[in-house]
Image (cartoon, rainbow, N blue to C red):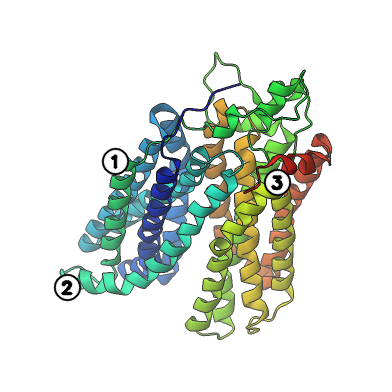
Amino acid sequence: MPRATPVPHRGLSLAVLIVNQLLAGVGVASGIAVAALLIGELTGAAVLGGLAQSSSVLGAAITAIPLARLAVRSGRHVALATGYALGMTGAVLIVIAATSGWVPLVFLGLAAFGAGTAAGLQARFAATEVAAPGFEARSMSLVLWATTLGSVAGPLLSETGDTVGQALGLPPLVGPFLFSGAAFALSTLLVATLLRLPKAGQLAADAVPAPDADAATGAAESAAEAVPAEPIGAGLSASTVAEASAPDPAKPIGAWGALRIAAKTPRALFAILAIVCSHTVMVGVMVMTPVHMMAHGLSLTLIGVVISIHILGMYGASPLVGWLADRIGPSRVIFIGVGVLLAATLTGILAPADDMLLVPLALGLLGLGWSCGLIGGSTLVTSAVDPSIRVPLQGATDAAMNLSAAIAAALSGFVLGVGGFAGVNVVAVLVLVPLVVAGVRAARSGGAGAEVSAGARAPAR
């Protein structure tokens, strides 16, 4: 059984991650809030504004795997600091490009901005590495919850940033990126100087044997059940776990190699699809909601209210979702998320665009379902494979998640034009089908009673 590297100040490390996530949230949100408007202003083509978000999402996808590799080689804190430093560099590039009128450099800066997002996503896995056994999902959810504060504060600072920027002689809409750069600079400094983590991918629970494990297969099952509340796959035989998730120690495993290994384990595949499918559904529906509402004559104020409710659903309930994942098991939380996402999409199919009760309800449920899928899937993916491929798999999963989001954002406009908002939601339902199939397959392979017994072993707090 591997012995976890001691973390002398778990509370301090988690506090640093939370504060850092708040700063990074400000860094991303204050700039992205005006990025589309800035592109439209520079190019004279408002339609190109949508490429701003796509550039940032693709930047997050491209940098997710290199940051994971850096975490394995040099430590998680180095990878996080690098990601935030790239986000700061992106903000500087945007200021320079917008001032000089060189539009391609703005898109490059927005792509570098995406590295800050990728680092923020990697921070949720860092939270599990400083958590006490049985508290992995709760620690992750607290870090994600801090994103709420940053996401709300960032856009509120945009107008102030614009005023400051124009006072300094910058063009309109450029000033908010000064705040973004400053927030990312503080994030980089905070992580580089204060954050010290165990070896990337190593959980405290890796050193805690499952008390009810059979003597003949205890070591293999403990490796497969690093999180005490792990619900799916706990009943896998030792040979299955070894063949599916343990790499050859003589061969270094990259991100895509880790993804191929994980896909052979039903519960690991379920975890990956939970993250990717939940994110795809959320992005595909969310990005078209403002377009749908505006086409039906609703004001920007009402659209802003609906999006705020959606963000609250995404992050506001994350501590509760994390607590549930630790108490009843992440796979059950994923299934709850599937149910919530189905309720959201069915409401979106049936709700008139001007119904200010059903439309906010649909978007709020969409955010809550995403939270269940992301937290449940991220918790499960940390326990579903051998620790040696955990970090490469996390990088590959985040890259796949962001790529799917970019594709969903690009295609959802076409789907809206052909099938309306109901069509967008119908496609979202279809995206959930592979997740449900993988979940049923994982439950059958792991045994229905595994979750109850595993959940009962979780320490009561």
Residue 362, x across and y down, in percent: 66, 71
Which of the labelled discs sits on residue 398, or is there none?
none
Q: Amino acid at mark 2?
A: Ala
Check whether the beta carbons of the residues at disc 2 and disc 3 lie within 8 A of each other: no
Q: Earlier in the sequence, mark 1 or mark 3?
A: 1
* 2 vs 3, front mark: 3
Q: What is the CA distance from the residue labelled 2 to the residue labelled 1?
A: 33 Å
Q: Which residue is mark 1?
A: 193
Task: Residue at 15%, 68% (x, y): give it.
Answer: 168
Q: Is residue 454 above or below residue 345?
A: above
Question: Is 142 or 432 nearer to us in this picture?
Answer: 142
Task: Residue at 49%, 77% (x, y): give it.
Answer: 304
Q: Residues within 10 Å of mark 3 (few under 14, many from 20)?
A: many
Q: Secondary structure at mark 3?
A: loop
Q: Is residue 118 left or right of residue 383?
A: left
Q: Residues within 10 Å of mark 1 (few under 14, many from 20)?
A: few
Q: Which residue is mark 2?
A: 167
Task: Residue at 43%, 33% (x, y): give it.
Answer: 71
Which of the labelled discs sits on residue 329, or is there none?
3
Q: What is the CA distance from the residue labelled 2 to the residue labelled 3?
A: 53 Å
Q: Earlier in the sequence, mark 2 or mark 3?
A: 2
Q: Amino acid at mark 1?
A: Thr
Which picture quadrant has residue 158? bottom left
